[in-house]
Image (cartoon, rainbow, N blue to C red):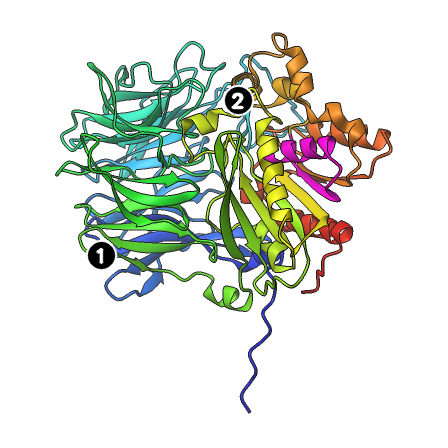
Amino acid sequence: MSQLPSKPQPITPDLVYELKVASGPSLSPDGAAVAFARGWVDRDAMEGRSQIFLLSLSDGQERPFSQGKQDTNPKFSPDGSHLAFLRPDENGRKQLWVIPVAGGEARQLTQLPGGVNDFAWAPDSRRLAFVSDVDPDRPPDDHDPRKDPKVKVVRRLRYRFDTLGWRGDAHRHLFVVGVEGGEPRQLTDGDWDDLSPVWSPDGSRIAFISGRREDRELRYRTEAYVVPAEGGEPERWSHDLYSVAALTWAPDGSRLLAIASDDDEANAIWQGFLFVLQPDREPLKLTDDSLRPVAGFPPVMPPPELRWTRDGRILFLADRRGESFLFELREDGSELKTLTGGGCLMTALTLDRDAQRAVVLAVPPDSAGDLRLVDLEEGTTQQLTHENAEYFEKHPPARLEKFTIERAGQTIECRLWLPPDFSPDRKYPLVVDIHGGPHGVFYDTFNPIQQILATSGYLVLGVNPRGSSTYGREFVKAVLRDWGGEDYRDILAAVDEVCKRPYVDPERLGVHGYSYGGYMTAWIVGQTNRFKAAVVGAPCIDLLSFWGTSDIGVPFGETQWGGTRFENFEEYVKRSPITYAPRVETPVLLLHGEEDYRCPIEQSEQYFVALRRLGKEAEFVRFPGCSHLFLRVGHPKLREEYLKRVKEWFDQHLRANSSR
């Protein structure tokens, strides 16, 4: 008797342990193979694991290539003979390793107290430039703080950074090391961070990104510099551009291509442009803001590869209206072509030597991410990996519907996630999910929180209100000095539109958000009582204290809210959700990491005390050892716990059928 197919199951919080993730692809110079890191959670050890694999593009066969427990960031040498990668040492600091592609033992090239967090091969394949932390106050590895406790002295505003932790007087600087090893040579120094090294085509110079201007602690300024590979005084090439996020060289080494911004209210991460840089000429802008070149998300995600080819093409990833694409642009800024993409988020790009083949990392709505091969000559795209096909066969993802509304002169794009077995004849509870930022954005991509809720019987609404990125610079800037204003009204207008549908139960509305989304969730329940449950993740609650306690309170807060707390005190109070705590009638669940330096946990502490003192229903969950980015990089058990508590709170208060 044939076995009946198993009943489809919802996606649950234990997806943290079930899903594998590909990252850091590197295409071999000859385009014959791609190296990448595959990550997963070892449930017995309760630790993240990562191993480097080599995938042959001729026959699709893959094999494990490294033997470490947490190997990441593979990069082929330009001659294709070696693969360099990062591996943690016994103290958990990532070090630079190299292994022959033809086979052989991996060799450790660095053993630095500051570890290695980024690196680049020289064109001759004999040297590597890398970035390491230089800390004048770092205690020795055998230091016992119980016997010899040390004070921490603060001399500058940026003395700590979320996820990186305590910074003090530590800075990241550039080093060079030979492929055969030896003592690394430090190239840069100073009271600033130097990042993202890129070798010139002839190997004589290294371009990099730094923030060296006098007001570097007060603003998000970064610049492009070039330094001789043998050492010397760096030269600034970016002139007066406000910020720089990624670099590559012209084929002849005469110019740089940069993802940068010329606007002091919109840095290159939020809305960048492609610029051509030369030391003796003003920057030349090549793109408009109908697209946003992908610049990564420091310090977690580096920017994808940029390529300027010998025949005058520029290849790059860019986002447009919540979708990612691989574009080709002529070096004079003409003839923009879409090569592949749409309907997904792309976070990585790698190309072969002659830019005939590309591999991208794409995350569509129905997958946690796979590698795709793009034949740039034939114009074809082929999926290379199928990381979680079996899981998604048993756990069908939610279905995505997109729609727009018009409000106050803006087109607001929305995404509605429907249960896999959605029926218009039923009534569903609705959860509004709000992204962070405020310059974040919801993409056509797989989002664990949205999928967990939607596959268990909720409708989930994601809105990209004004302030969201990928919709143009003026749309990004529309939220400045207006938190809780038009952005709030955009979200509520989208809720009104969805609630007109007969299958939405307007009496069972919930709202969730993290970071700025947490701010907006708390703001919403202080303005309206229509929501029956709220989950507030790592919020900004009190702008006055956030300004002085967040690692970005000054450069970020003063741009967003229009000056210091002393210059704009009443506006800070007016725009703070805690001001409206007496109005809250919605049950509130607060979720916050205890080592969050971006939105310090005192923000949730204040809000919880205010709500409870006022007799409101509130619960506060603290996640030990967790930074602001712990949902991406934190302990797997605590990531699962966050997802579980979000769902359980809505199940408790919205009475969804959680057994589906």
**Which residue is disc 1 drawn over?**
32
- Residue 143 location in percent, x, y? 58, 29
Is residue 625 found inside the magenta-colored segment of the image? no
Residue name at image x 74 percent, y 44 percent:
533
Dot 2 amino acid type: Leu
Who is closer to the viewer here, 21 or 332? 332
Q: CA distance from mark 1 to mark 2?
A: 48 Å
Say which of 253 and 148 sits in front.
Answer: 253
In the image, taking residue 602 as reference, residue 87 lies left or right, namely left
Q: Nearer the viewer, mark 1 or mark 2?
A: 2
Magenta-span inclusion, residue 526:
yes
The relative height of residue 463 versus residue 656 in the rendered view (above or below) is above
Determine which quarter of the picture holds residue 268. Answer: top left
Residue assigned mark 2: 480
Q: Amino acid at mark 1?
A: Ala
Image quadrant holding the C terminus, namely: bottom right
Residue 583 position, x and y percent, is: 79, 29
From the image, which quarter does the N terminus lie in? bottom right
Q: Residue at x 57, y 23 (%)?
A: 551
- What are the residue bounds of the magenta stretch? 517-539
Secondary structure of the residue carrying tag 1 is loop
Report helix, strand or loop for mark 2. Answer: loop
> Residue placed at 45% from the left, 35% from the top?
297
Check residue 369 in the rendering and tell me which mark sits there, or answer none.
none
